[in-house]
Amino acid sequence: MASTSRIFEYFVVCGLGPEIRALDGLKGFHGAEEMYMPAFIDQFPHSGHALYPPPPPQLPTCVLPAGVRIYSSRLDANDVSTYPRSYPIVLTEGDGSKIYVSCIAFRDPICEDIIEAYQIPVNSFADKCICFVSHSPCFQVLRDALEEIFVLCFSPAGCSKPLWDIISHVVSNVPLPTPGKDRVLFAIDNCLLSAETPPKEWLPHADISFQPLVQCLDVDKLIQLFTAVLLERRILLRSNKYTLLTLVSEAICHLIYPIRWQHVYIPIIFSSGVDYIDAPTPYMMGLHSGVDTSTVTMDGVVVVDLEYNRITTTEDIPPIPESEHSFLRGEILKLLQPNVVAIDYMKINLGSMGDYSLRTATKSWGQDHDFQLRLIFLRFFAQIMSGYRNFIDNALPTGFNAQAFLKKRSRATNQPVESMLMIMQFIETQGFLDYLERCNNAEEFTNNLLDKLQDATGRGQSPLAIFPSHVADPEIITIADSEIEGSAINTSAEPGNRHCYKSFPANARTEEQEEKRKSILALVGGASKQVPSSPAVRISGGPKAESLSPRERAAERERMVLDIKVKLQGLWLRLLRLGATEDPLSSFEYGTILALIESDAEGIGGSGFVECIREHIHSGWQCRLTDEQFIAVKELLKTAITLASSRDDVSTIRDALEVSAEMYRKDPNNVQDYVQRHLLSLSVWEELRFWDGYFEYLMENCSNKSTNYVTLVTAQLIVMATHMAGLGLPDIDSWNMIEKIAERNNLGYKQLIKLRALLTHLQQLRVGYWGVPIGKGQPLPSYSMASPRALDISDESEQPAEASVLGRSWVHSMFSRDRSLRASSFNRASDTKAGATAGKTDLAAAQKKTQTNMRILRGHTAAITALHCVTRKEVWDLVGDREDAGFFISGSTDCTVKVWDPSLRGSELRATLRGHTRTVRAISSDRGKIVSGGDDQSVIVWDKQAFKLLEELKGHDAPVTSVRMLSGERVLTASHDGTVKMWDVRTDTCVATVGRCQSAVLCMEYDDSTGILAAAGRDVLAHVWDIRSSKQMFKLQGHTKWIRSMRMTGETIITGSDDWTARVWSLTRGTCDAVLACHAGPILCVEYSPSDKGIITGSSDGLIRFWENEGGIKCVKNLTLHSASVLSISAGDHWLGIGAADNSMSLFHRPQERFGSFSNAGSKVAGWQLYRTPQKTSAVVRCIASDLDRKRICSGGRNGLLRLWDATTSI
């Protein structure tokens, strides 16, 4: 944006432009009931001005968030909905700075040339919005000036000068006043306006009223919203008034001063951007209450209904500590209801003893009330952050000793640290960390009102003492209304040199702008008319053409373009009617189109052919091609792209790339084959210059421009990655280009990680679907050894897929701030090849001669949701005489539990247990019983011998997530209701609720020998209880997102979370001993290896990491065997079984000679060696269980099939 030395940076008019497009992207006029995309119509300064960069590209979509509607009437005095609307909006740029816009939306006549070109009914009107744009938060000045401009335009008396001359004078000459020193006076026609800003020593400039906030929400709701914003939750404001959404958003941002909102901030989001509500990161957004959100998941979103004084959320918001809450609530009530609060006070003059807030009691709401409300919240921060400066420690990663601060506060308030959940979460927010960084800035520290207030309070002074006691009168700066010669526009003036308008006038356009507008409308008007015949196409000019004037030559070219496009449309439609017996490459249609493409030096034939396909797609064509059509279109597009590359016609290449991704055929096996895949041989895709241009095009034409810059860039790079994968570009080449563009646009590490993961996933899907592209790149290294499938087993429901895994060295380097390290990791193919060679060497050493076997177990009719293996330890099988040792027990969404005996080949199903009424989620067993829990909130105990229902345990109020059989006929269960219950099977009763969490429990561990219970889930805390003494030992705090997995061994607990980290906790001290943070996705399973006392973690990024635990935990080995989420890790003394969601499994072995001899890191890395992995299939897996004693791994798929892999029975 331009310099901020002026109040008014831009005057912009948005509405229906010459290129009409519906909200769904379809070009053209589709009736008055359709909503259309808003566009820039006029602006000052002009878009091509050398000194002023253009306004934000998302501005039209933001000022008219519902789109542009076309009307048959203008203003109806009896219909309030037809009145002009005035409202402010706020935009956020990529660097976090705010852009303030004042808007007036109204109905205005549609231009005659647009009506004629699009054949819109005459005397039609459309939404139009005029705006003042500024970087200064002078809302009232912007609104007053804009309303005066609007009144001047439509006033019967008119204005003394052309309207755009008045606008240009105001924008160009009104400066931004110096804070606390200047008052700028300027006039718009005969209306005098002024602007000034408060001194820097005062609270930040807020030119808004806080009254709408306190009128829409009562005190308790206001404090609840304030707390949610302070803790950086996802906030969605709803109202049917745009002004209210902006004013409340801005007011709450000012009330959290000195904290700054650090996340996505969109006070008014356009209706088509409702999907942004599902964003996982914190945000504050406003949405019109008329927009339907029934299709959006509101889980965790704090929805604030400003019309009905209502706040709803699915997650608890921790309350403010009692003392600070009482202060905040009481002071706000004093301000809002002074007559009620002070009803017992004596009505006498107390002189200087009177509180400042009492002096505003009899006044109507004004600036004094706004100031007092902001001061109340600043005093709140002074209390809750009391003494924080003593705990600033720049040697710590966060710069703040939070633990010491909480302990000090605990001693001062006589409250345990565990009760300060709100403060704990607050000091971990980005806003608080940003405030600490600003405290180190000399200028910020000098004007830090919070520190001044804490010091003044300590000295017993009034809070008002922190502000300057005397402010000098501002210097008056008058902006003269200079005489303007000439007129910027052609208008019809009334007598007396008064300028009157029937519609908002258009600004004077440059010749280039006028030519562009005419060409767009001419193309639309020509295409909408029927052309009876097509004259011969003149590709190149002759003597007659050379004698034409420039205007005639341009008109001749337009006729030639139209004629070629008409011909192409007819040929294209005939090409789509080719019969199955016709040779497409020798057909008349193919030859004529090819001739038009090849003979046209200006590219009209190639671009026209591509545009013809695109228009056919937009008209409803399903893009399905026969084999003959597929061959013809593929070759024609190749020719068009090749010729377009030779003349540097990027737009044609770009359009051809996009349409090629949509057109497809199906082979005899019903497998789709897209045209885009056959364009890989063209060299243009390897040029970074093309992808740079394509990225800029996507950014300019993005319809969702109201979000922040980082999200926009990421969305466009995702589109590019999809096309690169569709073409079949090598993974390394694709990532090189995407990374360079991302770094050029200052994309952060987190977005780069997600982009790299997406590209890898797309490449794997392509290779698994079509195989490695021929002629481009090298085959991807395979880390799997296919086991021969049993000849007597066939599975028609599963299609074999080629197992392939891409190198993931980018994940390691992503967590380094050294860009050179990332560049070397991403850009060097030699590293990947070397890793592949090493991987193949390991696999060759791992081959065994013993035969493997894979069996498909059928029985369930729906997805498998729970799978349990009966281990020897579980049934006390000391001598190998227990028949049930090695059984697999499965649960499904078909509400049944099935018992499988792998020793009975061909008849593995032993029993089907029916009793649940909804999905089965958890299974456990012991020597004589099976226990299962499900979504029906019940726990059922079954007899393992007779396979019949024994007891049904009811007591949970939500789905059961975990079950565990204990000694002494006891059962331990956990549920989404946040409770852990212990049951006595003999009496069919709940013995006790042994643990309570604040939200759903997702994982649970219990040590029967010590009575220690651990549970964790959605409240991001790991809870530890000693159930024998009926007390809670610890609340282990550290994770920031849901805890998915847990393993307890001895005095140690290991947890894995959606925050991409695993943590190791000490049960003796209740502290976190280590944070394992090298994954690029949620950690779904953690395991403890008893033989080497190591830790193994598996994540949704497909990585398996081995950590050694001697002299500090460190990662010693990484494996990339799986291309999808790792769901299960089971470790024994000598064997390790792992399964992933892509239906891949792997079995590891620890050679005997290495046991107990790990003297160095090298030996540890070689400790677990890959023994075997079977051939992967395309089924999607939900759960996996391992029987390490018999070297079996079983997976349960979404298709209801179990896949049992019997790796070997001998070594």
Image (cartoon, grey):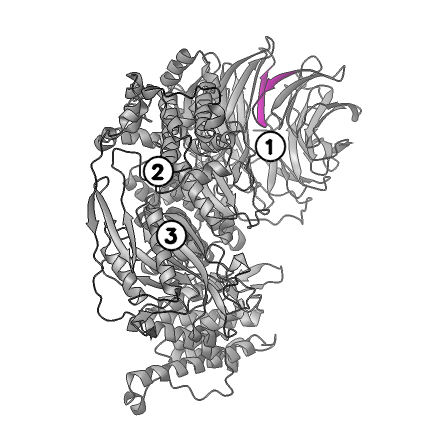
Q: x, y (%) of residue 469?
A: 24, 29
Residue 1165 sits in quarter: top left
Say the numbered circle drawn on residue 813.
Answer: 2
Residue 1144 sits in quarter: top right
Is residue 1002 within the magenta segment?
Answer: yes
Is residue 463 within the magenta segment?
Answer: no
Identify the secondary structure beneath mark 1: loop
Residue type for callout 1: Thr
Identify the secondary structure beneath mark 3: strand
Q: Where is 232 relative to 138, above or below?
A: above
Q: Which tag, 3 or 2, sits closer to the chain's start?
A: 3
Q: Is residue 283 visible?
A: no
Label 1 crowd bin: few (<14), some (14–19), many (20+), radius 10 Å: some
The residue at the point 29 percent across, 66 percent down is 160
The residue at the point 39 percent across, 34 percent down is 369
Quarter containing the C terminus = top right
Residue type for callout 2: Ser
Which one is nearer the viewer's eye here, 1069 or 55? 55
The answer to whether marks 1 and 2 mark residues whose Cβ atoms lie closer than 8 Å is no
The answer to whether marks 3 and 2 mark residues whose Cβ atoms lie closer than 8 Å is no
Where is mark 3, residue-wise? 102
What is the C-alpha distance between the residues marked 3 and 2?
A: 45 Å
Which one is nearer the viewer's eye here, 957 or 6? 6
Residue 977 located left or right of residue 535: right
Identify the secondary structure beneath mark 2: helix
Q: Nearer the viewer, mark 3 or mark 1?
A: 3
Judged from this view, the residue extending furthest toward the front is 348
Where is mark 1, residue-wise? 1208
Residue type for callout 3: Ser
Residue 1174 sits in quarter: top right
Q: Which tag, 1 or 2, sits closer to the chain's start?
A: 2
